[in-house]
Image: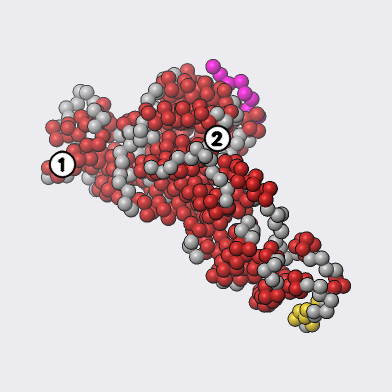
Amino acid sequence: MTSNCGSSSIINNINPPIPKWQLALVVGVPVVLGLGYIYYRSNTKPSLKPGRGQSEDTVKDNCTKADKQVSIVGDVFSCTERSFESTLEKAQSFKQAGNKYFNDGKYHEAIAYYNKAIETCTNENPENLSVFYQNRAAAYEKLNNYGMVMADCTNALELNPRYVKALIRRSRALERTNSLETALEDVTAACILEQFTNDTSLMLADKLLKQLGRKHAQEFMATKKSVMPSKHFIRTYLEAFRNDPILIELDSTSKIIPTYFSEVIQAVRNQDYENVISYCTEKIENLQADTVSKYKLHLLRGTFYLLLGEHDNAISDLNMIITTKSVVKELKVNALIKRASIHVQLEHPEKSFCDFDMAIELDPNCGDIYHNRAQVNLLLERIKEAKEDFEKAVELHPDSGLIYVQKCYANYRYGASKKDVSLIATAMSDFQKAFEKFPDCSECYTLYAQMLCDSQEYEKADYFFSKAMEKDPMNATIHVHRGLLQLRWNSDIEKAVVHIKKALELDEKCEFGYETLGTIEVQRGNLREAIRLFNKALMLGRTAMEVTHIFSLKDAAKTQITVSKRLGMGLASNMHLIS
């Protein structure tokens, strides 16, 4: 089966991916609002648009220009009390004077007149009084007096709990004082009240979620228990290396493996991955001399520390190989590649590229270097560099279906980024060649399906995901991707859940499955169940990057619960309790 979609339509239909935190936040809106929102709309008065211009005065101030007498003497405002019909009119005149000073950048003078407006206005006019507090908060914000900003915004919100400007301003002040959780609550409330239509509010929420995610991830990773990935994940990871000196030992049937190394190799062959590190440690301690076999044991142990997410231990083993002059280049190159991947996980890409450069100096014809560097470039959205590295890797490993199809996908991404129809057409043609050259490579079908998702060819994408499942029936990740497709294709939540639950049956350590299912539960309004699933994903996260992202999703869900209660909006009736 081939795709009949045109290249130009692909360019027009490519959708930028929605940030996952925003998906978690936004998809919950209909449920979070629900009847609570309808009740709010039916039972509250229209709120005033706060500002320093004329809108409020037009709405609330019924006096005419002749009723007021505001004169400017030098640089000082003088407000007479002649002809004022009410204290509100008088307060409004003080506010206007404050606005003039604010617009001129004279914030202390503005505050003085906002003080008079607040003192003059009575509690019988709560909406106007809330505006005066909000205006004074704006002036304090210009003076970086965040304590007073928070105090005035709080006063404004006590008078008008749905005052969006005050929520946003207090959120910014809370962020400046590192009160991130409360800041996120305020901006989330603003987003809900604005029905997620204000880009400024959404950007602030995104920023706060990232900051909060990093904070929680650092605290969590300090005490987190390491969990070995699933057998399928580890096997797939190991098989992606074509020049791994350990795998050469593993696949060798003719070579006699030394006794002290055979037990470790046998454990890897039997997929007894949980015991590989302890076996390596025992053998290393029993070997006195610094032999090639001893360094191989360090490399293997470092690899499994990497898989376990114990980066310090992994780097220690890899450094021993990299810094020892007598170690053969094959071991050094493999250690450099793996250390480079750790640097990326620790968000130090510049160190990663240094390691790749060192590896190329040692062995410029090792395809694993270019293959792994290409994936890092793709992760960092360096599409052109990824494309060039994949092409070099294919040149060195022309028999690898995995590398070939990843090159096709990078070429497609590059063509799409350039809006180049001919490049996209070439990439699509190369995918067809991949099916012919590597018919049993599941990655060929998976990446082609993802490309079809980008171009909204959902029915064809579903077909190719099903083909990928036939080739690799134990691959849980394919089921998760197919579940996500159901959401994009026809918003079929039930079918999506079936696919993702199947993924978790195949691999109970599929962090991607728990994370995605949690996001869907947010969409269904089951925020507490979503948090439970995010907690399971957190226990399986191996890197600070993964954990930070999951915490952002969890924090978004937790904040929605808090804010919904605060605004008096009901949550879905079928919400599960956190176990």
Which residue has dot 2 on it? Answer: 413
The image position of residue 38, as x and y in percent, is 65, 44
Q: Nearer the viewer, residue 36 or 406?
A: 36
The three-letter code of the residue at mark 1 reads: Glu
Q: Residue 527 has which mark?
A: none
Q: Nearer the viewer, residue 74 or 149?
A: 149
Quarter residue 452 falls in: top right
Q: Secondary structure at mark 1?
A: helix
Q: Residue 282 has which mark?
A: 1
Circle nearer the N terminus (2, 1)? 1
Q: Which residues are magenta?
A: 1-8
Res. 471 in view:
yes
The count of marks equals: 2
Quarter residue 155 falls in: bottom right
Q: Identify which residue is drawn at 28% across, 40% down.
A: 304
Looking at the rendered image, the quarter that the C terminus falls into is top left
Q: Nearer the viewer, residue 462 or 571?
A: 571
- Would you say the magenta stretch is mainly helix, strand or loop? loop
* Callout in the foreground (2, 1): 1
